[in-house]
Amino acid sequence: MLAEVLTQLALVISILVPMSVIVFIGRERLARTRSEWRSRLRTAGPVIAVLIGVLLVNRVARQTAPELSRQIGFRLSGAFYELEGEFILIFQSIQTPETTAYFSTIYVYGYTFLLIFPVIAYFTLSDTRIFRRLLTAYTLNYAIGLVLYILVVAYGPRNLMPGELMERMLYNTNPQYQYLTSEVNTNTNVFPSLHTSLSATVATFAWKTRSEFPKWFPIAVVLAASVAISTMYLGIHWALDVVAGTMLAAACVSLSDRLVGRWSVAELSAQFADRLPWPQNQD
């Protein structure tokens, strides 16, 4: 079943991405990318390597972190429920088969597309700084999120609220999705909402690059907002998780600017090498 879901996901993304490349990027940038991709990849290589490393750590931690979290984490499910009450049920009140289908689709397919397309789009820019900043922000989201998931043990509304109040709409209507979500998450990975933080990160970068990709900006904002709402509508996250995810996104975007700076690692290395007291050639 997992293979079937992954195949469906890959098929949808393989349709959406080429269409978006045509609509949002254009031939001119693609032509420049074909001639410059090696140099851009070398410049962004260190950031790409760090992101891959963090993703691998997250993959391994999915097996070991829950036990560590149970030992050292703060159990805050009850506190979240007490603070927020049944606010999340506001989103259940608009439930229809159509809205459930929309938010379920956004939660799985829209979110995946939202993360992948900006990576491709920003790689087509000759200046790699925005591309490196996006990958750095992704890295920070995953790294900080992992730490918070270990420190905070909390179940989402669908796991805590009584069944007569909160429906498990995502799995009731699309039971196959649980095979996918169980591969990348656990029930206590709630605070903050990484779906929200990563989507808000993409929306923020879309705003920053609205002059380069004016058509992408409104699409990214609508998708990001839909993803955040979907996490509450489907009962996966509390509103507190969404607020925390938005704050995490703001912090990661700001930190990415400070960490990446104005120069690449390769450029800094070249500047450093030029300052070394190399021996002069003797005639």
Image (spheres, rainbow, N blue to C red):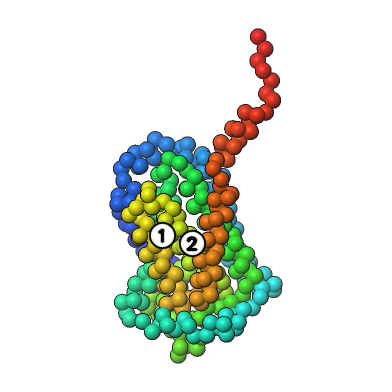
Write the residue at 60% across / 82% down. 79
**Residue most toward the top?**
283
Residue 43: give x, y in percent of width and height. Answer: 52, 40
| Residue 188 numbered tag | none
| Residue 198 numbered tag | 2
Question: Which quarter of the figure has residue 126?
Answer: top left
**Are the two marked residues, 1 and 2, in contact with CB atoms closer than 8 angstroms?**
yes
Amino acid type of the residue that numbered disc 2 sits on in the rendered structure: Leu
Q: How crowded is mark 2: few (under 14 residues within 10 Å), some or many (20 or more)?
A: many
Q: Circle 1 — which element?
A: helix
Count of numbered tags = 2
Write the residue at 56% across / 37% down. 266
197 w.r.t. 43: above or below: below
**Residue most toward the bottom?**
164
Residue 245: give x, y in percent of width and height. Answer: 52, 67
Residue 40 appears anywhere in the view: yes
Q: Circle 2 — which element?
A: helix
Residue 215: give x, y in percent of width and height. Answer: 32, 54
Question: Which quarter of the figure has residue 276?
Answer: top right
Determine whether, in the image, residue 4 is placed left or right of residue 251. Answer: left
Write the residue at 30% across / 43% down. 27
Give the labeled residue for mark 1: 114
Locate the C terminus by quadrant.
top right
Amino acid type of the residue that numbered disc 1 sits on in the rendered structure: Leu
